[in-house]
Image (tube, rainbow, N blue to C red):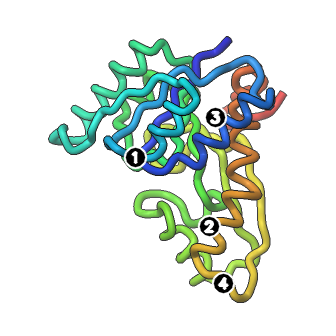
Amino acid sequence: MKKIVVLVSGGGTNLQALIDAEKSGIIKGGRITCVISSKDGVYALERAKNNDIPTRVIPRKEYSDSLSYSKAILAALNEEKADLVVLAGFMTILDECVTKAYAYKIINVHPALIPSFCGEGYYGLKVHEAALAYGVKVSGATIHFVNEEADAGAIILQGVVNVEKDDTPEILQRRIMENVEWKLLPQAVSLFCQDRIEIIDGKAYVK
């Protein structure tokens, strides 16, 4: 049984999707063993506690730079013996000391169809604002591995939704979360835990 450590910074809706998927048997071969938050007092921590999942808080504001913070995260992941790390609304970009130590073992969800509207500065509602400003007819989410470059790791799964004429960033965000993120993230985690993701020439394929 693989140990899944989830990193959070906010409300934890994607964490809840993972918890629900684990309870319903969608996630096979793994279980969430720890939730680590970059902030104290966020609702994601309550979600974990309500489901008897151990939590840790490593406040980003207590560290002077990204490297020192990443080293603290790395130490925690090693202590938790993480087999898989899931970034579920984790708002801090990790230094390569983490991404190299856990190469092809960190999964992130990005609320757009990579390579569109991704990279540094594209997060939260900013992604959906950019998509609507461009006038795209479909958008969606991408589940991908994390590497040294923002949103540039191997793509595992993608899903799409239609963009409607009267969409606001908030409406589009909700449609993508409900129809893509909350379904595909648990699916990707389950595939990983069953050793069904193969890396060939830096690309991910489902076996």
Location of residue 97 by image quarter: top left
Residue beneath label 4, please? 135
Q: What type is the residue that disc 2 sits on?
A: Gln
Q: What type is the residue that disc 4 sits on?
A: Gly
3 or 2: mark nearer the eye: 2
User: Which numbered disc, 1 or 3, marks the residue that appears first in the sequence?
Assistant: 1
Marks 3 and 4, Cα distance to the nearest angstrom?
A: 31 Å
Q: What type is the residue that disc 1 sits on?
A: Val
1 or 2: mark nearer the eye: 1
Residue beneath label 3, please? 202
Q: Residue at x 51, y 18 (%)?
A: 82
SS class, disc 2: helix
Q: Residue at x 59, y 24 (%)?
A: 32
User: Which numbered disc, 1 or 4, marks the residue that appears first in the sequence?
Assistant: 1
Marks 2 and 4, Cα distance to the nearest angstrom?
A: 15 Å
1 or 3: mark nearer the eye: 1
Percent of width and height locating residue 149:
45, 45
Q: What type is the residue that disc 3 sits on?
A: Gly
Q: Residue at x 44, y 39 (%)?
A: 148
Label at residue 173: 2
Percent of width and height locating residue 112:
63, 61
